[in-house]
Image (cartoon, rainbow, N blue to C red):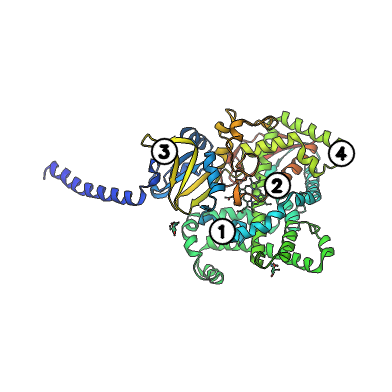
């Protein structure tokens, strides 16, 4: 047997195999998006996903944006083509013009449905539209105004507790944990008329708060299974039947999630029952409650009672709203507040400037600032905007195209074949990732200093390139809260919350950096982690100044 025979034998096996493979690949993986440039796959199984969805992905994402511009192809599982988009015109189409085509992914909808119930986070189409119709007015400026006393009440408890912690002198404290507790208590009192946490230094965490913390870890263990099994499985049988199946299968990770979800649900049911009782007893009983009947759920339940039959929501839907609001309000806002305080600890000049602005304004008012005076404080406003621009707590969101559609671009790109592309053919079922952070940091819109933290940019006229781009964001040219019918419903609420908390804290304390090095991790909701540790925290040195 000669070596030639060996080579022939090898070729006669590999050539047909290769051909077969190419056919297979062309059939399943070649597609309309092949001509869109993007980073080369790093592995056949996961494409570029390991780098793309990575806790330390900041530099990778910066490089992607610089290399490929506002739209690129992303190789996902088994070579599937996805899109990564932050071109302004494309965003306009995705979030406004063609928003009915670009849906939330089934993983998002069904995952949220399992955990938070039938609320805004888990519904689509007509049902979602109907829910927004009833909820949007609840988040009006008028109602935000009514919530001011609750906000000041909660933050003064916070100030008291933090003050006690540093009564004997400056001390390092975990700002993240305080901000999470504050965010929970604020959405608790002003959203549900319910107190979760007395905000004292030694208070034991509410079961809700423990469950919510454990959820991410427990859910994370099921990630792969949930993203592939949940969409088909959630269609089988009734809810009761599915619960029965979950109870009998011997799978600990699933039971952990079940137990956590039970705590979240039971908490909402309990609050719901208290509210229903008070509503039945009338306005007087309601006024005696923590939210004085002005909290989001009281308003919502009243709105439901006076709505027409076709507009009204079921009990499950109202419970779903409670659970969704609690979830959506906490980690996002505490991330934003922690980041802003971290920046202020890094830049003492900014902290001093803000403190002076607050002191002057309060002196002029002779006490707590009413809503209009608070939101008009120019430097506080500029700081919040700049923090939310440069450090969007949610850096990426996902969508899926529900039919073939053209996606036009502001800036044409050059295809792999060298030809210019000014609109992209997006086939039905294409998955997209939206670059919230990349849009907020786009130098073509914001100028060459787009990657720098400069609150002053908001005190001067914004660049023409930005205003001409017509970004679809609901909040000051930012994509932080996205846009369209699924834009963050709580964006005004979170603005107010950030401002009241910052005002209260900066007035009373000085924040300085601790020695510990902090990594901000690029996860679904960005979180600070001390280098070498795993559980998120943000140590900062706190000093009382009044
Ligand atoms: C700085 C704080 C916040 C940020 C950065 C933020 C960001 C976002 C983003 C990016 C989305 C869209 C998610 C997607 O469609 O994939 C969203 C949705 C949502 N947010 Fe916020 N959020 C914040 C605070 C809040 C607060 C305080 C509340 C409630 C009081 C809230 C309630 C919601 C709800 C209910 C949705 C789902 C809306 C829908 O699908 O119709 N958020 N938020
Ligand atoms: C909402 O309002 C409708 C119509 O008044 C009513 O039938 C329904 O029971 C209400 N839902 C809840 C959960 O109160
Ligand atoms: C898109 O594809 C799905 C199946 O993946 C199909 O059910 C749906 O009808 C398609 N939509 C259109 C508009 O063709």
Which tag, 2 or 1, sits closer to the chain's start? 1
Position of residue 452 measured from the top left corner of the image (x, y, whole percent): 61, 30
Q: Which residue is mark 4?
A: 365
Position of residue 164 measured from the top left corner of the image (x, y, whole percent): 80, 44
Q: Which residue is mark 2?
A: 492
Q: Quadrant of residue 362?
A: top right
Query: Callout 2: helix, strand or loop?
Result: helix
> CB under 8 Å between callouts 4 and 1?
no
Which tag, 3 or 1, sits closer to the chain's start? 3
Residue pictured at 58% horizontal, 58% vertical = 122
Tell me the CA gap for discs 2 and 3. 38 Å
Of labels 4 and 1, the one closer to you: 1
In the depicted structure, whether residue 422 falls above or below residue 259 = above
User: Would you say the beta carbon of the disc 3 residue lies within 8 angstroms of ligand 3?
Assistant: no
Tell me the CA gap for discs 3 and 1. 33 Å
Q: Which residue is mark 3?
A: 37
Label 4 CA crowd tier, 10 Å (few <14, some 14–19, many 20+): few
């Amino acid at each position: 047997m000669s070596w030639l025979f060996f080579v022939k034998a090898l070729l006669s096996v590999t050539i047909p195999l290769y051909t077969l493979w190419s056919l297979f690949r062309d059939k399943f993986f070649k597609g309309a998006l092949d001509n869109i440039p993007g980073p080369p796959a790093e592995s056949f199984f996961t494409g570029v996903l390991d780098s793309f969805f990575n806790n330390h992905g900041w530099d990778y994402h910066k490089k992607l944006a610089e290399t490929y511009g506002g739209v690129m192809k992303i190789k996902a599982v088994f070579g599937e083509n996805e899109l990564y988009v932050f071109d302004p015109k494309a965003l306009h189409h995705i979030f406004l013009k063609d928003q009915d085509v670009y849906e939330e992914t089934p993983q998002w909808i069904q995952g949220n449905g399992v955990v938070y119930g039938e609320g805004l986070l888990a519904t689509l189409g007509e049902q979602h539209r109907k829910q927004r119709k009833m909820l949007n007015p609840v988040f009006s400026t008028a109602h935000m105004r009514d919530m001011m006393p609750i906000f000041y009440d909660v933050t003064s408890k916070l100030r008291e507790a933090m003050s006690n912690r540093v009564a004997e002198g400056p001390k390092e404290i975990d700002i993240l944990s305080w901000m999470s507790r504050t965010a929970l208590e604020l959405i608790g009192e002003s959203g549900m008329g319910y107190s979760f946490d007395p905000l004292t230094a030694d208070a034991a965490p509410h079961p809700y708060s423990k469950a919510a913390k454990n959820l991410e870890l427990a859910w994370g263990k099921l990630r792969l299974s949930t993203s592939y099994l949940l969409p088909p499985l959630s269609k089988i049988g009734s809810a009761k039947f599915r619960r029965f199946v979950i109870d009998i299968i011997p799978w600990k990770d699933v039971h952990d999630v079940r137990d956590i979800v039970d705590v979240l649900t039971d908490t909402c049911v309990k609050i719901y029952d208290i509210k229903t009782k008070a509503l039945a007893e009338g306005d007087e009983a309601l006024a005696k409650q923590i939210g004085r009947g002005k909290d989001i759920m009281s308003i919502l339940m009243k709105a439901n009672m006076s709505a027409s039959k076709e507009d009204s929501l079921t009990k499950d839907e109202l419970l779903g709203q409670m659970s969704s609001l609690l979830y959506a309000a906490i980690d996002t806002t505490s991330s934003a507040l922690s980041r802003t305080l971290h920046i202020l600890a890094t830049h003492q000049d900014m902290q001093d400037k803000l403190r002076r602005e607050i002191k002057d304004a309060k002196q002029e008012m002779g006490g707590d600032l009413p809503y209009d005076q608070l939101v008009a404080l120019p430097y506080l406003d500029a700081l919040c905007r700049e923090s939310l621009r440069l450090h969007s707590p949610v850096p990426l969101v996902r969508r899926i195209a529900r039919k073939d559609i053209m996606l036009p671009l502001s800036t044409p790109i050059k295809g792999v074949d060298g030809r210019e592309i000014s609109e992209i053919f997006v086939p039905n079922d294409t998955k997209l990732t939206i670059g919230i952070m990349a849009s907020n940091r786009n130098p073509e819109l914001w100028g060459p200093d787009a990657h720098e933290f400069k609150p002053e940019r908001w005190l001067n006229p914004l660049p023409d390139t930005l205003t001409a781009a017509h970004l679809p964001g609901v909040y000051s040219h930012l994509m932080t809260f996205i846009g369209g019918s699924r834009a963050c419903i709580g964006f005004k609420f979170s603005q107010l919350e950030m401002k009241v908390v910052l005002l209260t804290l900066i007035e009373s304390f000085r924040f300085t950096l601790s020695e510990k090095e902090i990594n901000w991790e690029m996860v679904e909701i960005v979180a600070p982690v001390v280098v070498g540790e795993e559980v998120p925290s943000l140590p900062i040195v706190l000093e009382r100044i009044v």
